[in-house]
Amino acid sequence: MSIISEIKCARCDRKYSGIHSRCPYCGARRIGSGKYSEEGDNSKGKMLISVLIMSALVIAAGTLLFTTPVDADSGAGAATVTPTPGILDDDDTNSIVNPITPPPSPEIVSPTPSPTPALKVNSVTITYSGSKRDDITEYVGNQLLLGARVDPVGIEETIIWMSNDRSVFEVVATNAEGTAATLTPIARGTATLTVSVGGVEATCVIRVRVK
């Protein structure tokens, strides 16, 4: 039995002694038991590429390991991940959602208040001693204090007192509002007293007598 084993060439399929590093028949280089490589093979280039690929895999695995969130209860050596400022998603407290700027609120324009309509005079009444009067008899030498009651109260209109015959009697308002007036009989006769306010009038017949 031969001590040195025979090698079968992987290229020409012939057997030769294991002491040879190349096939004596075809010249193929022996690699391992019966394997060969071509003369033009770039073994160093292939090895360099393999090393680079392995290095990239190691770096990727390390990055993934250190960036994966770790539960605080998993151990003292657990890596701490600081979340980026933002808004937490409702479904995952570790998931950060970029804040969204809400659209500007529409401008609210307050309506211009409508002016309060002025009060309109419903009626005016001539009074004497608080009672409505439309016919009064008075003597020369006396004076009557009369009043004007306007409905509604608070009308900001000028109250006008007027005699249609000043030879029979005169009338003069006695307050700034014009709600009161003094009537003075002048001579025997009959005349009409008129009170007007806001386009509404009231009249009273004044009969003047001589004592």
Image (spheres, grey):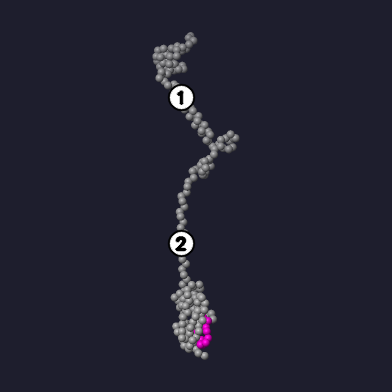
Which residue is rendered at x = 49% and y = 43% of the image? 98
Residue visible at 54% across and 81% down in the picture: 129
Is residue 145 within the magenta segment? yes
Please give the name of the residue rendered at 46% of the width and 86% of the height, measured from the top-left corner: 167
Which sits in the foreground, 136 or 2?
136
Q: Residues within 10 Å of mark 1 (few under 14, many from 20)?
A: few
Q: Is residue 111 visible?
A: yes
Q: Taking the image as drawn, is residue 92 in sight?
A: no
Q: Which residues lie in the magenta part?
A: 136-146
Q: Residue furthest top?
A: 1
Residue 209 location in percent, x, y?
50, 89
At label 1, the amino acid type is Leu
Residue at the disc numbered 2: 112
Amino acid type assigned to the residue bearing label 2 in the image: Thr
Seen from the viewer's position, the closer of residues 8 and 60 is: 60
Tag shown at residue 48: 1
